[in-house]
Image (cartoon, rainbow, N blue to C red):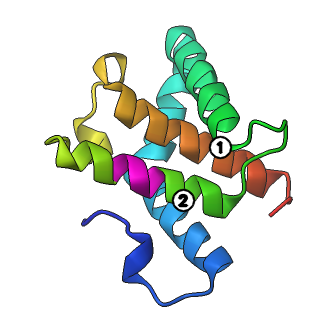
Amino acid sequence: MDQPRRMDRDLPEAELARFVLDRYARRLGDAGRAAAARDAGLRALLDQLTARVGDLLAPDDRQPTLDELASYADGLVDAASGLGWTLPDCEDVLWRYADEITWRLVAVCELAASRVEGADV
C-alpha cells in the first residue's frame, strides 16, 4: 500500500482529512493502539506522545481538528521520508522497539479516534 497523501485526492477538506487519517489508522494506528492497550509501558508512551502532538497542534487547550491532524501526519511522513524513513507495515513493527515517528503517527490516530468517537468533527 502506498503512503496516504492529502494531495493525491480531489475531495472536500473534511472528507479528505478523514480519508487520509483512516489510511494512516489502517496502515499503522489501529495496530499501535491495540499494542498500547495490551502493554502499560506502551500505553504510557502513547499517552505522552498524544499529549505532545495535541499541544503542538492546539496549544490553546482545544482539540486539534481532523484537518490539522492529517496535515501534521503528512508533514511528519514527508520530513521523515526525506531522511530515509519509510512508513512501516503494522505486521512488521515490533512495538516495543518502534521509533518515535511511528509512535507519533499512532498518536495522531489516537487523537483522530477521540475526535470521531466524541462526534466533534
Give the label, 2 or 1, closer to the camera: 1
Q: Above or below — where is 74 with respect to 63? A: below
Residue at the front extreme? 60
Q: Nearer the viewer, residue 107 or 76?
A: 76
Q: Position of residue 26 (x, y in %)?
A: 44, 56
Q: Quadrant of the N terminus?
A: bottom left
**Dot 1 amino acid type:** Leu
Q: Above or below — where is 61 with respect to 75? A: above
Task: Give the left or right position of residue 19, taking residue 74 as reference.
Answer: right
Q: Position of residue 111 (x, y in %)?
A: 66, 43
Q: Nearer the viewer, residue 12 or 38?
A: 12
Q: Earlier in the sequence, mark 2 or mark 1?
A: 1
Q: Position of residue 19 (x, y in %)?
A: 53, 72
Label for residue 97? Answer: none
Q: Residue at x 86, y 59 (%)?
A: 120
Q: Residues within 10 Å of mark 1 (few under 14, many from 20)?
A: some
Label for residue 70? Answer: 2
Q: Residue at x 42, y 57 (%)?
A: 74
Judging by the rendered image, the residue that carries numbered circle 1 is 57
Task: Give the left or right position of residue 39, taking residue 87 as reference.
Answer: right
Q: State which region is magenta.
A: 73-77
**Dot 2 amino acid type:** Ala
